[in-house]
Image (spheres, rainbow, N blue to C red):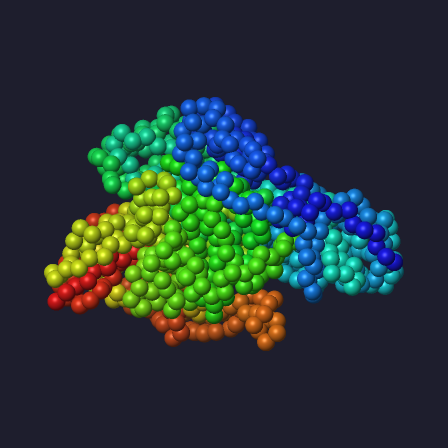
Amino acid sequence: MKPAPATTRPPESRTSNRDPRFCPRSSPGANVIDRRILAGSAAGSTAGERTSSRTSSVSGFRRMAGEWVKGRWCPKVTSSLGLHLANANQRTIESLNRLSYIRRSPPRLRRGVAMSQYVEGDQYGVVTLDPADAIVAGQYGTWHLTYTCGSNHLPVGSCLHIYTDSDTDWEMPQFLDPAAPGYMTWQAPDGVQAMVKAINLKKLVVVLGGRELQSGEQLKVVFGDPGDGNPGTRAQTFIDQRRYFWVDVELPDQQERFTLANSPHLSVVGDQPVKLVVTVPSTLSIGEGFRLLLKAEDQWGNPAHGYTGTVRFQAELIRLPADQFELGPGEATLWIDGCQAIQSGTCTVQALEEEHGLVGESNPVVITETPAPQQLLWADPHGGQLVLNSKIGEFYRYARDVAGIHFVGYQRNADVISAEDWEVQQQEEVAFHEPGVFVPIPGYEWSGRTWEGGHHNIYFRRHGQSARRNAAAETMFRSERVTAELLHVRDVYDAYRNTDVIITPHVGGQHSDIQFHDPSLEPAVEIVSSHGAFEWMLRDSIERGYHMGFLGGSDSYTGRPGDDRPGYQTRRYSKAGLTGIYAQDVTLDSFFEAMRARRVYATTGARLIVGLESDGNWMGSEYATDSAPTIRASVTGTAPLEKVELFRGLECIGQAPLDVQGAPNRVRILWAGSSRMMSYSGVIWDGSLCLHGARIKEVSCQRFDSPRSAIREQDEQSLNWQVWGCGYPMAIDLDLEFDDASEVSLQLSVGTRLITGPGFGGHGEHGPMRMSRAPAEQCSIQVGLAEIQQQVQQYSLGVLDRLIRIGPVPTGQQTQVSWEMRDESPQAGWQPYWLRVTQQDLEMAWSSPVFVDYVE
């Protein structure tokens, strides 16, 4: 049977990553954006949709309105605020107008690769999803996907490809156990045989056999068939306005697949709130006004859905416009204007919603008598990426109005950026560019493999620049690949040297090999992200004598920059990191100046306030001296502090004096480490504890970021657990009851499994990549409580940095420290002095070094 020709969209849409139904091409700033997130619509509207605005304490800032006229962006000044934004963005507009016209043509078919095109009508079939209602993140359910064959019969050997664009953590389908979650079934007409195979979390393939599927016949796939009483399948844990179930039809011996334009989607919304999150500026001066961001958060870190409540605030040193505010209905975040610092000191803002028992406390704010030369601002330079360019606007809106950060980088992997992707990204960068409020950092991720130098983030100081691709490493998503230009990181350095560009290495899909380094381009290295914490990258930089600062970021695919959580992803186990940046103001120029000066530090996501100087030279500085340097440090934590360590190079030379004691009746079992010094290096810790001579009154967990991490069983004398993590410390705190400590002993058994991400194609050099878990070190430890009370016991597993530590739970309420130390034994030559901060809740921060050239 010869198939009828497909009815396709115009050529410019054939290679599009936009949703052809919901994302018409429109100007990037032609609507007014209310600065809030509607929980019912997940992360807000797309750039081409209008959202409602309201008059209240919600901020009235607006995106710059305008239109494209003969290829140029022309702003419309509708108010004094619009005039201010138009003037502030004029240079950005001029840069964008210098963009060359991007010519689009139909995709060329590549040998051995099935390209796809959208098809309207029903000649290749119609797909429905039931139910198609909004689903609560992380909820279990059952969904029926029904394919009805169109006027073109599907011959034997045809395939239906069912897939999604997001890096979802939707539960993996399984066909073996009808009593277990994730059970999948399928139904086909008599005589039609099929094989349904789950390739990974994102893709199913149905291969038809037996006889052809005729017009009007249906094939059904059931996600989460309840079978023998299972709860169904678990939906993804992160919000998404349009979670697609794309369906492609592939005919035998064809090099083209037909994407059904009627492919269904549903929206994923937040769950019920479990706490309040309050975000305020980290530094203010007396009399300075500011905005406060309030968020009702669900168990997955999303803005909650369907919540209504009255939130009361309490704060010292700060004046709020009112004592209480209404949140909802349907509203999950709220900007509150009209706040003011009225007295110097350090404080937080407490929030309480009595009806649902929700509480929250803001990050600390330090208020000074006069303005400081730089503000402490917050950035996620490596905020991550998305596959569909129609979701880039939602990405920026989340960073601004949910995470409440000042700078964010959308960093799409270069080899999969289509011409249209890059155009849309730049439009959105301009549309959301609001100096003084929020600044997207133009750029992309050069994503060569590790042996080519590894992944590096590229940041531009000006809009309207070109993305330059690395050699193909990933599969394009229905787009034509742009020719690669830069095949090795040395080519990247050559291309951008002596330009307005910053480059930062990191540990991501392919970790950077920092034996390659250009100090004129690379001021800092990312050491913490949703992949984990990578102090080995910090150590590598210092051992090589590089002068680099330290950064934190997200590097996620969930569209939640600045505040991402790992969910049930198989490649990520940690919540997102953040970068504290001391900058003059919220502008692209100030961001670049601060980055090049290395006035930055990395955190595990908590907004600790960290300061470091040596002889008056601020963190990131370089200076020479013939005197012993005097180091001054200050830290304000988001929780009580446990340790503030000062390092010279890789040697800890001192600790800040803190009022921290060990609780005599509480024990902390801590573990940390990674599987290897490269990407995808998590560890699964399986453990059990038997207690003799005491009983367990209470158990609490620290840094169980992944929902896979949990106490599995517990009684008064024992417990067992499984915890997933990468690099950072995690712990279980036990509150014990006993008569005599000398009679109490702990029997601890631990098994580790190492998570890796090898390729399983060819000789292992190609995909598909699979996350693998290899059994590793197993150990048994017996220790007495009296011994633990006298000294913390640490046990190395003998490989890399993997360790177990047993000791008293640290106690104390000190959240601030200022400390001065003179290095009485300075070392000749360049020496980096830097801080590592650990809170009692195991949140951490790493300051960039001060680089001291000591001349004897």
Write the residue at 36% across / 38% down.
Answer: 280
In the rendered structure, the answer to whether residue 640 lies left or right of residue 672 reads left
Q: Is residue 408 above or below residue 574?
A: above
Write the residue at 63% across / 61% down.
Answer: 200
Write the residue at 37% across / 64% down.
Answer: 517
Q: Nearer the viewer, residue 839 or 388?
A: 388
Counting from the top left corner in percent of width and height, residue 304 is at 52, 39
Counting from the top left corner in percent of width and height, residue 402 is at 47, 40
Could you tell me if residue 301 is visible in this image? Answer: no
Could you tell me if residue 502 is visible in this image? Answer: yes
Counting from the top left corner in percent of width and height, residue 816 is at 25, 47
Q: Is residue 282 above or below residue 788?
A: above
In the rendered structure, the answer to whether residue 441 lies left or right of residue 558 reads left
Quadrant (top left/top right/bottom left/bottom right) for the N terminus: bottom right
Q: Nearer the viewer, residue 573 or 101?
A: 101
Q: Is residue 111 above or below residue 380?
A: below
Write the residue at 50% across / 53% down.
Answer: 467
Quadrant of residue 56 within the rendered picture: top left
Quadrant (top left/top right/bottom left/bottom right) for the C terminus: bottom left
What is the tally of numbered marks visible in this picture? 0
Counting from the top left corner in percent of width and height, residue 768 is at 61, 66
